[in-house]
Amino acid sequence: MKKKILSAFLILSLASSFTPLEISSQSSVYLCNSSNAKKYHYTKNCRGLSNCKHQIIKVSVQEAKKRGKTLCGWED
């Protein structure tokens, strides 16, 4: 029993010490191809894209930032 508790504690301690995934400027992200869209998303099925009525396109992070997009609040 003590081994299981210790193992669980170690796993939780290690998991909480990691920072969110940093995406390099070479990675691809998704955005709604609309003039009103303000965010980019790590995954095509992000809930932040659920209201997109336009085409969802895949671009580099650098291109998304160049277009004035910022990271979606659901994914930061």
Image (cartoon, grey):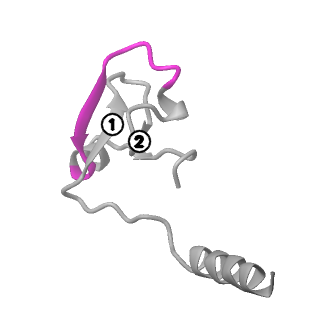
Image coordinates for residue 9, horizontal then vertical, percent: 72, 81
- Quarter holding the N terminus is bottom right
* Lateral position of residue 51 relative to residue 69, left or right: right
Q: Earlier in the sequence, mark 1 or mark 2?
A: 1
> Residue at (52%, 49%) from the top-left corner?
75
* Lateral position of residue 34 relative to residue 12, left or right: left
Secondary structure at numbered mark 1: strand
Image coordinates for residue 26, horizontal then vertical, percent: 18, 57
User: Can you tell which mark lies on residue 30?
Assistant: 1
Quadrant in the picture for residue 69:
top left
Question: In the image as oriented, which residue stretches furthest toward the right?
Answer: 1
Depth check: 75 or 63 in front?
75
> Residue at (36%, 15%) from the top-left corner?
54
| Separation of marks 1 and 2 at Cα, in angstroms | 5 Å
Is 60 part of what is drawn in magenta?
yes
Secondary structure at numbered mark 2: loop
Image coordinates for residue 74, horizontal then vertical, percent: 57, 45
Given the image, on which type of amino acid does mark 1 rest?
Tyr
Residue extent of the magenta highlight: 50-62
Given the image, on which type of amino acid does mark 2 rest?
His
Up the image or down, 22 lies above or below 55; here it is below
Is 63 part of what is drawn in magenta?
no
Q: Do the residues labelled 1 and 2 touch (CB within 8 Å)?
A: yes
Up the image or down, 45 lies above or below 67; here it is above
Depth check: 3 or 15 in front?
3
Quadrant in the picture for residue 5:
bottom right
Question: In the image as oriented, which residue stretches furthest toward the top?
Answer: 53
The residue that disc 2 covers is 41
> Residue at (66%, 75%) from the top-left corner?
12
**How many numbered marks, from 0 up?**
2
Image coordinates for residue 40, horizontal then vertical, percent: 39, 41
